Amino acid sequence: MGLFLYIDIDAFFASVEQSLNRRLQGRPVMVGGLKHERGVVACPSYEARARGVRTGTTLHEAAQLIPDGVFLKGDYHQYQHYSDRFYDILSSVTPDIDRVSQDEACLDIAGAVRRFGSPRTLALELQSSIYERLALSTSIGVGPSRVVAKIASECRKPMGLTIVDNDSLRDFMAAIPIKRLPGVGSVTGRILREMGIETAGQLAQVPETYLKRIFGINGLKIAAYSRGEDGIPFRDYRAIRTVSRETGFAEDITDKKILLSHFYYLLERASAKLRRLNRKAATVRIKFRYADFETIEGTSPLSPPSHDETAIFPRVEMMFERLFCRRLGIRLVGVTLANLKGYADNETLIKDRSERGRNLLRGLDAARRKSGFFSLMTGRTLALAERYQRGDTGYVLRTPGLSQ
Ligand SMILES: [Mg+2]
């Protein structure tokens, strides 16, 4: 078995707000919308949780529970910026990182642990350097498999650390309620409970063949998880399958050049994300929505797969030229990079791009990480400078889409 560390930023959005504005520290902060707006709380701080507000509590209810609470719409560019810095710190431990979401990751620390002495020292150093540099608290789980590390990370929050080794694995899993296992949703959970199975320990006693007959492949997965094993590659669980960026406009746009600049900008952001993920896309999709809400989508294969906006953009441009045929304004555009392929970096010596080109991209990413997005501007997106304000991490678009 291996050694894995699962790390999760506590109350991510709310904690970023508290990190940016010290006056919010210790106060019940709720990100998701303003008081009495329609909608729900996307992320309550621990102070707000202590007073009964959960993720998904309506803003109206939250305002009644905590009349003196701080209600914020949220700044998704800032969250992405903090997420990038979080991942920079993680990469200093090991390059072997599974990105689960903006604020959750699983690290293979089998090699790195030697440098630190013990998993505990490694975890504590990681926790304190994230706290010192970003003022964010994290909860960590360490275990012999990814699934155990993940479950352990949920045991103590905030600023928790739970370490499960081979000796304590059996006892640890025995008490875990089945609903905490990945793959056990409400339907599977209900069926298992009807069978009298409440814990991972009890589930581990059920013959695999029996679970397979009832639940198919998922039965084999949860059987492995119940023993604390990853079984079928854990990567499949909530793995990032696409990277999308989209934005709506305050006013409909008809100018083709301006529309293409938006596509380029979104593609540039999505490609940079792919490069950070060490992935290439074999498919690019575009979509746009006319003023009357008709939505048009186009798909194009990328061969060879790419994470380079300059190589991908001609495809986007071609599709858009072909599909944009009504004489009507456009209210929203979006780009998706899909069909993602992993690759080893030295393998990319294959002909798809010269060494020099790749170094340029790497340099661009590094410079922007250090000095901000606007330290290097590409010609295509300069057209946007007149329309948008510059934020710390890029243009402040009206509705930034940040889906994975
Ligand atoms: Mg979190």
Image: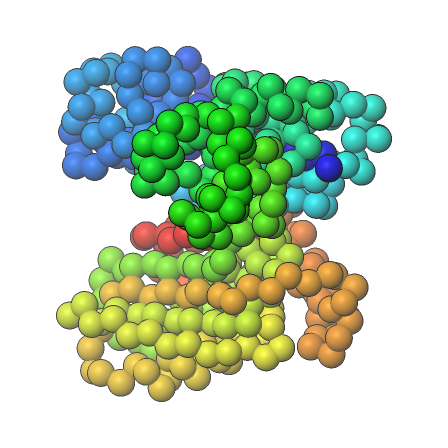
x and y percentages locating residue 396 in the rendered image: 39, 50
Q: Is residue 399 visible?
A: yes
Q: Residue at x 73, y 69 (%)?
A: 348
Q: In the visual, does 378 lie left or right of 250?
A: right
Answer with the quarter of the image where residue 299 lies.
Answer: bottom left
Split into 4 quadrants, where in the image is the N terminus? top right
Q: Nearer the viewer, residue 228 or 235?
A: 228
Q: In the visual, does 297 lie left or right of 102?
A: left
Q: Residue at x 47, y 44 (%)?
A: 210
Answer with the quarter of the image where residue 354 lies.
Answer: bottom right
Q: In the visual, does 170 lie left or right of 183?
A: right
x and y percentages locating residue 176 in the rendered image: 49, 24
Q: Nearer the viewer, residue 355 or 155?
A: 155
x and y percentages locating residue 64 in the rendered image: 17, 18
Placement of 5 over or under 295, stated as above or below? above
Q: Is residue 17 visible?
A: no
Placement of 378 over or under 34, stated as above or below? below
The colouring scheme, among rainbow, by chain, secondary structure or one colour, is rainbow
Q: Residue at x 60, y 64 (%)?
A: 341
Q: Residue at x 55, y 55 (%)?
A: 273
x and y percentages locating residue 65 in the rendered image: 21, 16
